[in-house]
Amino acid sequence: MEVAPSVLQTRGPLHIAYLITRTDEIGGAQMHVFELARCLLARGVRVTVLGGGEGTFAKMLRRAGIPYQNVPQLVRPIRPATDWRCLWKLRAVLKQLRPDLVTVHSSKAGWLGRLAARSLKLPVIFTVHGWAFTEGVPPVRRALYALAERMAAPFADRIITVSEYDRQLALRHRIASAARLVTVHNGIPDITPSLRARPGEGERVRLVMVARFSPPKDQTLLIRALAGLSALSWELELIGDGPLRVASERLVHQLQLNDRVHFLGERQDVADRLSKAHIFVLVSNYEGLPLSILEGMRAGLPVVASDVGGVHEAVSHEETGFLFPRGDVDALRSALRRLIEQPALRVRLGCAGRRRYEQAFTLEHMVARTWAVYQTVLQQKALREP
């Protein structure tokens, strides 16, 4: 870290513009932007969030009093004509706003936002919420995404990765120099003590996985692992929605687990559901540093997760939970069996996870370290100006 993280301090009325592609869902990148914008706004920094559409996330921002501006041309699919119009629209919006700093999030917003900001000589930071060329992505796609990021990297003053794994991955792929890559772990706000879980209590063990039903995740592997533990007393809540939900529902029906596996869809009361759980599970094919794992640790739950991306930077194997190799159903089943059968182990790992959250993954940690990167870039800009 180039600037020692300290309490958040501002020097004058700064204006920061956040740019993110999707507003039709509330995922890790959206919550990251929301919490940063909310905290900075509360501390007197002027904030504007730009995004594509008027979806759930845009409504969430407006309810919180965070200024939001829709850029309808900003869409996730690659559409050259639309993307070209989006670039010029972003340039016009940023020229009008004249922010002191632009921070861009997600691949499409990252590409177009960096180009638009650099064309106006505005300092810009790209935050990576998991590289599109990470391990687990098909090889051809990995090569193409790495090439695209290597081309776009020079347009950012700094690149923030939410895990050290992603920083090292960028260095291996020669995306940018070590000096321009900085790791700032994700952080989330704390909950009231009443929302802390009691993983050692109760007869039937409740497992919860919070994730979108999409290719990065693998709910079906979890369902198959639990099907082999039918003699034990457990139930599973799957929170989230997405295109692969139907396949998971079909598998549950085939395995005759309808009375044990519950599909809750998208929920606004995730913290409450976790407070009633005993084990948190996240099965993934690839990740950055998922917020859902931090939510499980914050609640005081033992975490069982795929050892992919930066997950091991949050979950310490056999200390705060269990890690298992990507796609290994037997290793997953073994970890689940141990936790279902041993209430004392759930309590010990859950308490350790809660301490780990307090030490490294609070919102205050993330904001302070992010602000330090912002200050570095702004100071360098000031030195360049006549």
Image: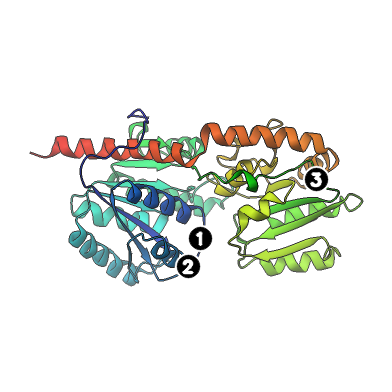
Task: Tell me the mark number nearer the camera, choosing from 3 and 2.
Answer: 2
Where in the figure is residue 110, as x and y percent of width and height? 36, 54
Q: Which residue is mark 2?
A: 56
For mark 2, give the secondary structure: helix
Would you say 246 lies left or right of 168 here? right
In the image, what residue type sits under mark 2?
Thr
Q: Residue at x 52, y 33 (%)?
A: 360
Which disc number belongs to residue 80? Answer: none
Give the class, few, some or many, for how many residues have Cα within 10 Å of label 3's Cα (few <14, many ≥20): many
In the image, what residue type sits under mark 1?
Ile
Q: Which residue is mark 3?
A: 333
Q: Which quarter of the rendered picture does the C terminus lie within?
A: top left
Where in the figure is residue 116, as x and y percent of width and height? 25, 57
Q: Which colouring convention does the figure follow?
A: rainbow
**Label located before the other in sequence (3 or 2):** 2
Q: Residue at x 47, y 54 (%)?
A: 31
